[in-house]
Amino acid sequence: MPPPIRNLELRDRLCELLGEALEDQRRAAPLYLLRSFGRLVDEREQAEVPQGALIEASEIAFLQVGIGVSGREALGELLRGGLLEQNGEDVGEDRLTPGKALLAEWSAAISRTEACCRALETLYRRPIRPTGEVERAMDEAACLFNEGLFFEVHEVLEAVWLKQEGDVRPLLQGLIQIAVGFHHLENGNLNGALSLLREGREKVKGLCRERFGMNLDRFLEQADECLRSIESLGSEAFDRFDRQMIPRMERLHGEA
């Protein structure tokens, strides 16, 4: 799972890009361009990439996932948002470097961008997407949760749970709390993690069953196992808790 981003403004900006990509596949282009930038930096082992090379690499990525947008258009959005910066001095071609916030949290931010793109690709491979608001949000949340994007799960479900009635409302709220509990654990907040995992468990207990095309009963059982492990480890949970125990939100027909 990707490490947390400490700079909240940077975290929120990446989350905004993800939200736009979830609304419209064409708007995923900036995230994929940022992923391409990260891969080129790693290949070249220097935090500077020729603009032409980035445009070429990103447009190949766009074609692979069916995004009909130009690389220059996507690059413009990242430049305007300060995630990338342009440097054309003393060279024949503009070269691109990470913005200050991105550079300061390079590894975490690029790891999170990679995870966002994997989650999007899982969604894009679906032959049929749910049309109901709650069902669609749960489909998105499952893909994000399975990539360790717990804060982003909160953002997706938060947008719909307040509008719900009946047992759907506490069920969604409980799932949000479980996701945020794991988010707190990754941020080193043990008390917050334990509190929200417990509250989330109590909210969803008896409400899960097979809902929204997912086996949420099994998910809750595994979340309970995580809670017991974290409780027993106490302050050592940050280092010793086995992240492989964190459950997956599985669709009933076996897809993630």
Image (cartoon, rainbow, N blue to C red):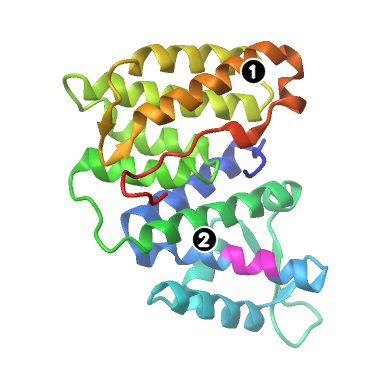
Q: CA distance from mark 1 to mark 2?
A: 33 Å
Residue 125: percent from left, percent from top? 37, 64
Q: Nearer the viewer, residue 147 or 159?
A: 147
User: Among all residues in the image, which is located at the extreme bottom?
Assistant: 92
Asked if residue 116 can be seen in this view, the reply is yes
* Secondary structure beneath label 2: helix
20 to the left or right of 80: left
- The spot of residue 55 in percent (x, y) is 57, 79
Amino acid type for the residue under numbered disc 1: Ile
Going by the numbered disc 2, the residue's amino acid type is Leu
Disc 1 marks which residue?
Answer: 230
Q: Would residue 164 be found to the left or right of residue 117 on screen? A: left
Mark found first going from the N terminus, 1 or 2: 2
- Residue 31 disc label: 2
> Which SS class for mark 1?
helix
Query: Which quadrant, please, contains the N terminus?
Result: top right
Locate residue 138: give its quadrant. top left
Magenta segment: does it hold 133? no
Image position of 256 (left or right of 12): left
x then y, percent, for residue 113: 58, 54
Residue 220 position, x and y percent, is 42, 24
- In the image, residue 125 sits, relative to residue 188, either above or below, namely below
The quadrant holding residue 54 is bottom right
Q: Is residue 162 left or right of residue 153?
A: left
Asked if residue 37 is among those painted magenta in the image, a careful observer would answer yes
Does residue 206 lie above or below 132 as drawn?
A: above
Magenta-highlighted residues: 34-39
Q: Main secondary structure of the magenta part?
A: helix
Give the residue drawn at x 43%, y 72%. 65
